[in-house]
């Protein structure tokens, strides 16, 4: 029962931190800005454009919107997470089979 209370308290703390950050971020947002949570890349790009710096190269593909760009980034992160999880699972399975005694099934050897 105590484990569940700690878990619920941690989840509640996460929700409170997120809510406060969104509230404070909304207060600091410039009404003329395009995005509420712009990154440093966009700030540096605007500063360089103001100073007349010309880019060295052009993007290979121009994406239509910021939503498409963030969606592709999320898909890339998901694929990376899947690959990392697969590799960690394979290494864990290899370690279990190598540490199992000969002649004992892996499922009973790891249950100890």
Image (cartoon, rainbow, N blue to C red):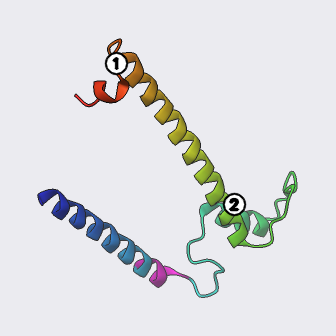
Decide which of 46, 57 is in the foreground and name it: 57
Residue 27 painted magenta: yes
Q: How many marks?
A: 2
Residue at x 69% of width, y 60% of height: 72
First to last magenta residue range: 24-29
Residue at x 34% of width, y 30% of height: 107
Q: Position of residue 16 (x, y in %)?
A: 31, 74
Decide which of 22, 47 is in the foreground and name it: 22
**Mark 1 and mark 2: Cα distance apart in space:** 42 Å
Mark 1 secondary-structure assignment: loop
Which label was assigned to residue 72?
2
Q: N-terminal of the two: label 1 or label 2? A: 2
Residue pointed to by mark 1: 100
Left or right: where 41 falls relative to 24: right
Q: Nearer the viewer, mark 1 or mark 2?
A: 1
Q: Main secondary structure of the magenta part?
A: helix
Badge 1: how crowded within 10 Å, few (<14), some, or many (20+)? some
Residue at x 34% of width, y 72% of height: 15
Marks 1 and 2 close (CB-CB < 8 Å): no
Question: Which image quadrant: the C terminus?
Answer: top left
Left or right: where 106 falls relative to 75: left
């Amino acid at each position: 029962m105590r484990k569940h209370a700690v878990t619920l308290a941690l989840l509640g703390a996460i929700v409170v931190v997120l809510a406060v950050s969104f509230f404070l971020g909304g207060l600091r947002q410039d009404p003329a800005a395009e995005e509420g949570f712009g990154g440093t890349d966009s700030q540096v790009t605007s500063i360089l454009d103001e100073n007349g710096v010309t880019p060295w190269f052009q993007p290979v593909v121009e994406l239509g919107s910021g939503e498409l760009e963030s969606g592709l980034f999320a898909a890339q992160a998901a694929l990376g997470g899947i690959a990392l999880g697969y590799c960690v699972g394979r290494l864990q399975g290899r370690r279990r089979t190598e540490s199992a005694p000969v002649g004992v099934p892996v499922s009973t050897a790891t249950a100890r």
